[in-house]
Amino acid sequence: MFSNASKNALFFLSFLSLLLFAPGCPNTTNQEGNTQNDGGTTEKTVQPLNCEKGTACFVVGNQDVRACDILLKNSAAVQNPRVEFDVEAIGQFKHRDTRLALSFIQQKDNGFAAGKYAALVRMDGDLAGLEISQATCYDRKGAKIDAPDVRMERP
């Protein structure tokens, strides 16, 4: 079982790796619509996550996965992204230009439930050009998983 210190260390390392791919944001908007000029990140957890039209939904198929860093690319600039994470996960996101980075970790030592969405992404504009550029996931000990089976669905 993960100790709180292990969870925090794993999440911190995952988030730092995201910073390599999505450095700095001049302006971000949090879930309440407040603009942050410090390049900060936001998070929101909800239950249950419903994959609706106009949403990109992320499923983690490998039950050994406890945390993931996902880099998305869009055909146009990402505008006003809104990300929601499963209630059993803690997550953050950051965007810049055509890139959007997500990082999330399970709060308990459980895999992501089959058929359940780990995260949802909504944004202004068309999601048709959004694709997974890279997905790196980790097991309960923080080791990288070679085949995490992260999929994006769009209804």
Image (cartoon, grey):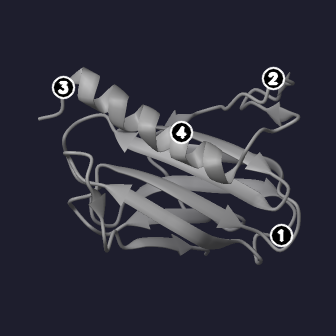
Residue 82 against residue 3 in the figure, above or below: below
Residue tagged by mark 1? Answer: 126
* Residue count near mark 1 (Cα–Cα under 10 Å), binned few <14, some 14–19, many ≥20: some
* Residue count near mark 4 (Cα–Cα under 10 Å), binned few <14, some 14–19, many ≥20: few
Sequence-wise first label, 1 or 3: 3
Q: How far across and how far down the image is residue 24, in percent?
A: 77, 38
Q: Residue at x 81, y 39 (%)?
A: 25
Nearer the viewer's eye, disc 1 or disc 3? 3
Q: Is residue 109 left or right of residue 123?
A: left
Q: Mark 3: which secondary structure?
A: loop
| Tag 3: amino acid | Ser
Residue tagged by mark 3? Answer: 3
| Tag 1: amino acid | Asp
Sequence-wise first label, 3 or 4: 3
* Residue count near mark 2 (Cα–Cα under 10 Å), binned few <14, some 14–19, many ≥20: few
Nearer the viewer's eye, disc 3 or disc 4? 4
Nearer the viewer's eye, disc 2 or disc 4? 4
Sequence-wise first label, 2 or 4: 4
For the C terminus, the image quarter is bottom right
Residue tagged by mark 4? Answer: 16
Residue tagged by mark 2? Answer: 38
Q: How far across and how far down the image is residue 139, in percent?
A: 24, 53
Nearer the viewer's eye, disc 4 or disc 1? 4
Q: Mark 4: which secondary structure?
A: helix
| Tag 4: amino acid | Leu
Look at the numbered discs 3 and 2 and tell me whether their residues touch, using CB distance below 8 Å.
no
Q: Is residue 51 left or right of residue 6?
A: right
| Tag 2: amino acid | Asp
Q: How far across and how far down the image is residue 20, in percent?
A: 63, 48
Using the numbered discs, state the Cα–Cα distance from disc 4 to disc 1 in whole angstroms.
29 Å
Using the numbered discs, state the Cα–Cα distance from disc 2 to disc 4 in whole angstroms.
17 Å
- Of the pair 35 and 94, the residue shown nearer to us: 94
